[in-house]
Image (cartoon, coloured by chain):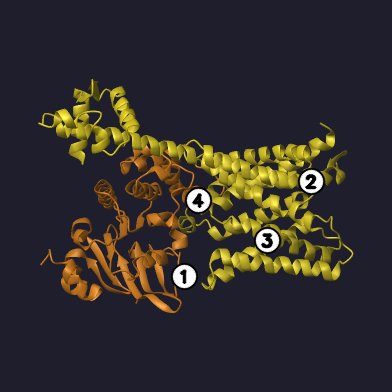
Chain colours: A orange, B yellow
């Protein structure tokens, strides 16, 4: 493929990831255009989270390349923010919400140097954007699941990146949090950022996103929601079960 | 206090503070067991270092000891990567192997050197004042010098890499994504654990090393929700356990390290019981309060339901609560008292009446449920 990858915020080429010689992702090609708000959907075990982790080099790639603005992740680290799954950390850790959000600044601050006043201001602003201003000094174990998710989102906002990769931010959150997250996603898009979200609720895809990647180990379809979010493609990604998932749209 | 008494306590306090710093991160990473492993396997490093350098006082021995500690972690992680054993089992397999190699080498090659099991496990702090070095013209116990240097090194490391340690401990994935290699930070921490363990082991034995690395941070974890404070509290608790342990050992004429290790346990149990938020007593009180509040709420809802109905005369009486809500007369009485204090009900002879405030409260509760 002779595509100019620098034209895209994210270009994934021929990506294969295997755990114990079992492919989890098989020859995946995806390009994400600038300013896209993209959902990654697919059944359980389709490799959605693995795709994001492989992009960031958190799991080893068996084959393929990932380019951010045509360059490697290591070169463009500062421009990529990552929201891991909420369950991936220990929320009993002795720290408060502001401190967690401040961690989003660490990449810019670099080794050894301490966060300064400006970083603190950015962190407060990020908390404000997710409706958590009043919880800055709250111990993180005392936050509800939805509030913890918003803290994670605020941490990514504090990174002030051009690309946002989010792993299941809507997982198990309350309605307030869901609305807050959607508002932030739309706001990021309005500011020209590129956002990719692992998502599990097919029903809300057309409402929340404008691009979608249908994934099931292989990339089934990738493009604008109105073009590729079709029953045929969904059936290809999910198998027979999709009829149940889509009955409202029929 | 004699000078040697002071010196013993200073060595113990330095060991306690030095152990607390890496200990905090071990506890937060849930890898407390690794302190047990490393505090034993450093012996292998010391033995190999001694064979190569031929000198038990050589400061380079600490490099070999740290190497043995890192080797312990590396081998455990290799075993873990096979996915055939869990982390605790991997550590449990590696450290006895390395420790026993050390013991075999000693018994085969250094038959003349007396290895005292008590000395390995419990150390002998009482001898600390006799082993002295001259530093800038003054004679100091070797333990003060060695542990002072290790404590300062740990303090500098945690101060310089505080942000990195916090990030890698809380969220290794983000640390990796942001370019702060969690593996590098992990091995840095393990090096600190190894160096601290070998320095401390020499004076207090391996049991107290483990106790000082784990118990004070575990206690501090219950007392604060800020990482910086957890480190400070851990050091203070460790020092308090060391000094109180020393005096108890003197009073009861028992091994000093043993008494200190016991005191770390006692401090932990005290924190477990009495910690203001997370202690067991606080938890019991919180549950009792919640139960009492719920009882008042049940009372209000009950009164509201029967208010103005034909059976109000019989239902809404103090005596009837024991049947209706299954309360003992004593508990019914206490709950009514509590509701009265809050201004929710009035007790007129035996009849219970809701006040306006109580009625509003009951309506809110009924609306929610």
Q: Nearer the viewer, residue A83 or B35?
A: B35
Q: Earlier in the sequence, mark 3 or mark 2?
A: 3
Q: In 3D space, how far apart are the residues under numbered discs 3 and 4 (Cα atoms)?
A: 23 Å
Question: Nearer the N terminus, badge 4 or badge 2?
Answer: 2
Q: Is residue A65 above or below residue B178?
A: below
**Quarter holding the C terminus of chain A?**
bottom left
- In space, the residues marked 1 and 4 are separated at their CA atoms by 22 Å
What's the distance in space between the residues labelled 1 and 2, CA to CA?
49 Å
Q: Nearer the viewer, mark 4 or mark 2?
A: 2
- What label does residue B125 carry, if any? 2
Which chain is indicated by disc 1? A
Q: Secondary structure at mark 1?
A: loop
Residue at horizontal 61 percent and vertical 64 percent from the top: B91
Chain letter for mark 3, please.
B
Callouts 3 and 4 on one subunit: yes
Q: Nearer the viewer, residue A117 or B313?
A: B313
Q: Which mark is residue B35?
A: none
Q: Residues within 10 Å of mark 4 (few under 14, many from 20)?
A: many
> Callout 4: residue from which chain?
B
Secondary structure under the numbered disc 2 in the rendered image: helix
Callout 1 touching callout 4 (CB < 8 Å): no
Nearer to us of marks 3 and 4 is: 3
Q: Which label's residue is closer to the chain start, 3 or 4?
A: 3
| Residue corresponding to mark 3 | B69
Q: Quadrant of residue B110?
A: bottom right
Disc number placed over residue A60 in the picture, else none: 1
Observer able to see residue A73:
yes
Residue density around tag 3, few if under 14, some if 14–19, many if 20 or more, within 10 Å: many
In percent of the image, x 56 and y 51: which residue is there? Answer: B27
Q: Which residue is mark 4?
A: B167
Q: Judge from the rendering whether residue B141 lies leftward or rightward of residue A119; answer left or right.
A: right
């Amino acid at each position: 493929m002779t595509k100019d990858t620098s034209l895209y915020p994210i270009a994934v080429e021929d990506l294969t990831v295997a755990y114990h010689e079992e492919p989890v992702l098989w020859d995946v090609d995806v390009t994400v255009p600038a300013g896209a708000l993209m959902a990654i959907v697919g059944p359980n075990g389709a490799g959605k989270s693995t795709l994001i982790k492989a992009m960031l080099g958190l799991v080893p790639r068996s084959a393929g390349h990932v380019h951010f603005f045509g360059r490697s992740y290591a070169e463009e680290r500062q421009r990529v923010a990552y929201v891991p799954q909420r369950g991936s950390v220990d929320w009993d850790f002795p720290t408060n919400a502001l401190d967690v959000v401040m961690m989003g600044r660490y990449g810019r601050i670099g080794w050894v140097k301490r966060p300064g006043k400006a970083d603190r201001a950015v962190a407060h602003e990020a908390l404000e954007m997710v409706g958590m201003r009043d919880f800055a000094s709250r111990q993180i174990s005392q936050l509800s699941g939805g509030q913890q998710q918003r803290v994670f989102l605020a941490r990514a906002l504090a990174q002030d990146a051009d690309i946002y990769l989010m792993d299941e931010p809507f997982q198990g959150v309350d309605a307030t949090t869901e609305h807050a997250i959607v508002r932030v996603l739309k706001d990021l898009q309005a500011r020209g950022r590129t956002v990719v979200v692992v998502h599990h609720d097919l029903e809300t895809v057309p409402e929340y996103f404008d691009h979608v990647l249908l994934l099931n180990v292989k990339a089934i379809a990738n493009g604008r929601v109105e073009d590729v979010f079709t029953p045929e493609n969904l059936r290809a990604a999910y198998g027979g079960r999709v009829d149940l998932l889509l009955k409202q749209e029929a | 206090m004699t000078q040697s008494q002071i010196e013993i306590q200073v060595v113990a306090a330095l060991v306690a503070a030095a152990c607390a710093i890496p200990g905090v991160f071990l506890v937060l990473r849930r890898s407390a067991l690794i302190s047990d492993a490393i505090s034993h396997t450093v012996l292998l490093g010391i033995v190999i270092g001694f064979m190569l350098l031929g000198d038990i006082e050589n400061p380079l021995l600490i490099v070999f000891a740290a190497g043995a500690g890192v080797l312990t972690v590396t081998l455990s992680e290799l075993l873990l990567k096979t996915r055939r054993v869990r982390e605790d089992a991997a550590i449990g397999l590696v450290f006895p192997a390395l420790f026993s190699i050390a013991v075999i080498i000693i018994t085969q090659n250094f038959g003349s050197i007396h290895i005292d099991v008590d000395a390995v496990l419990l150390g002998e702090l009482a001898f600390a004042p006799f082993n002295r070095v001259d530093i800038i013209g003054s004679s100091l116990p070797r333990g003060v010098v060695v542990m002072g240097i290790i404590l300062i090194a740990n303090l500098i490391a945690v101060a310089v890499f505080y942000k990195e340690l916090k990030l890698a401990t809380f969220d290794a994935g983000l640390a990796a994504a942001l370019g702060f290699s969690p593996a590098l930070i992990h091995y840095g921490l393990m090096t600190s654990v190894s160096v601290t363990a070998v320095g401390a082991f020499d004076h207090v034995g391996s049991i107290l090393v483990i106790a000082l690395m784990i118990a004070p941070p575990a206690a501090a974890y219950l007392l604060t929700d800020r990482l910086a404070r957890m480190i400070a509290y851990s050091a203070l608790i460790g020092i308090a356990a060391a000094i109180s342990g020393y005096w108890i050992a003197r009073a009861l004429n028992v091994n000093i390290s043993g008494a200190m290790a016991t005191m770390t346990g006692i401090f932990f149990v005290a924190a477990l019981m009495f910690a203001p938020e997370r202690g067991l007593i606080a938890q019991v009180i919180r549950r009792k309060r919640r139960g009492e509040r719920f009882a008042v709420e049940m009372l209000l809802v009950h009164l509201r339901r029967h208010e103005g109905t034909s059976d109000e005369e019989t239902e809404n009486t103090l005596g009837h609560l024991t049947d209706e809500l299954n309360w003992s007369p004593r508990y019914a009485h206490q709950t009514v008292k509590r509701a009265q204090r809050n201004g929710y009900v009035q007790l007129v002879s035996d009849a219970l009446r809701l006040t306006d405030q109580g009625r509003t409260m009951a309506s809110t509760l009924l609306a929610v449920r």
